[in-house]
Structure formats: structure tokens, C-alpha cells
Image (tube, helix red, strand yellow):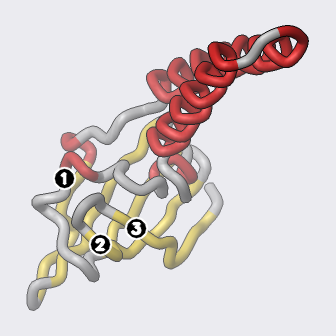
Amino acid sequence: MIAPTTILTDLEFVAARVGKLVTDTEGPENTHWQNCADKLAVALDEAKAAIHAMPKFALRNLAVLNYAMGFTGWLYRAGSAPLSHVLTQGFFDDAQHMFGVGDTITITATEGTMIVGVRSTAPAVTVAEMARTKP
């Protein structure tokens, strides 16, 4: 799943390119690009607000379930965060120093429980779904 901040970065890039087209064109074509720039500005503001409103990772909701032979099983209580949001690359970055590749995280949320495997820890924590249940 693509991280919301990556989508925001892409939107900012497109808005900058359209902004350059606005300054480089004249007449009806300029009006077209200005309309595009206005719509992109609204979309960018909405994306920033949505990202800001998303639940963030909370270290206090992470606990070790078991540890053996370099493998750790974790439990994370996602609270109001949807499971799809918890799957985004970088969600667990604040605990990057705690995870190892191959660790598992059991995630509990209002919409069900999911077990994910840690696929990478650098440059960002990436997880992959292994199993899912419904509440």
C-alpha cells in the first residue's frame, strides 16, 4: 500500500508543474491551466487535512507477546486506525529500532484482527499481511 505522505508528495509535485504552466502560458490555455491549478490546490488541502486526521502510531499500544531465537511476536492495538492504514509503509517507523525482519505483529482493531510480517525495517518499516479475521 502506498503511504499517504507519498501521495501528498506526488500531488505537490504535480501542483508545482501546473503552476509553472500557468505562468508560461497566455490566453485561453492559461485559463485552463489556472482552473487545473485551483482544483489541485483544493485537492492538496483536502489531502493534507486527511493525513493530519489519520490516527498515528502509538508506542504505548505496542507490546511483546513472545521472543525466541531472535524472533519477536508483537501485539499492537490499533484503536480507531483502520487496518488498511496500519498496513501503509512507514506506519510503524517510530518503532523501527525495535523490529527485526521476520518478526510478526498481531494487530487488533475495531474491524478485526490481522497478523502481519515485518518485511523490512530500513529505510521504512514495511509489513505484509499474513492472516486476517473479522470481529
Q: Which residue is mark 3?
A: 127
Q: Is residue 23 left or right of residue 69?
A: right
Disc 1 marks a residue whose amino acid type is: Ala
Q: Is residue 50 above or below residue 3?
A: above
Q: Decide: few, some or many residues near mark 2? Use Cα within 10 Å; few <14, some 14-19, many ≥20.
A: some
Q: Which residue is mark 1?
A: 95
Callout 1: helix, strand or loop? helix
Q: Residue furthest right?
A: 28
Residue 78 position in % (x across, y down): 41, 45
Residue at image location 66% in from the left, 19% down from the top: 24
Q: Is residue 39 above or below residue 80?
A: above
Residue at image location 41% in from the left, 56% down from the top: 89
Q: Which residue is mark 2?
A: 120
Callout 2: helix, strand or loop? strand
Give the image quarter of residue 102.
Answer: bottom left
Look at the numbered discs 1 and 2 and tell me whether their residues touch, using CB distance below 8 Å: no
Disc 3 marks a residue whose amino acid type is: Val
Residue at image location 26% in from the left, 76% down from the top: 103
Residue 43 seen from this side: no
Q: Earlier in the sequence, mark 1 or mark 2?
A: 1
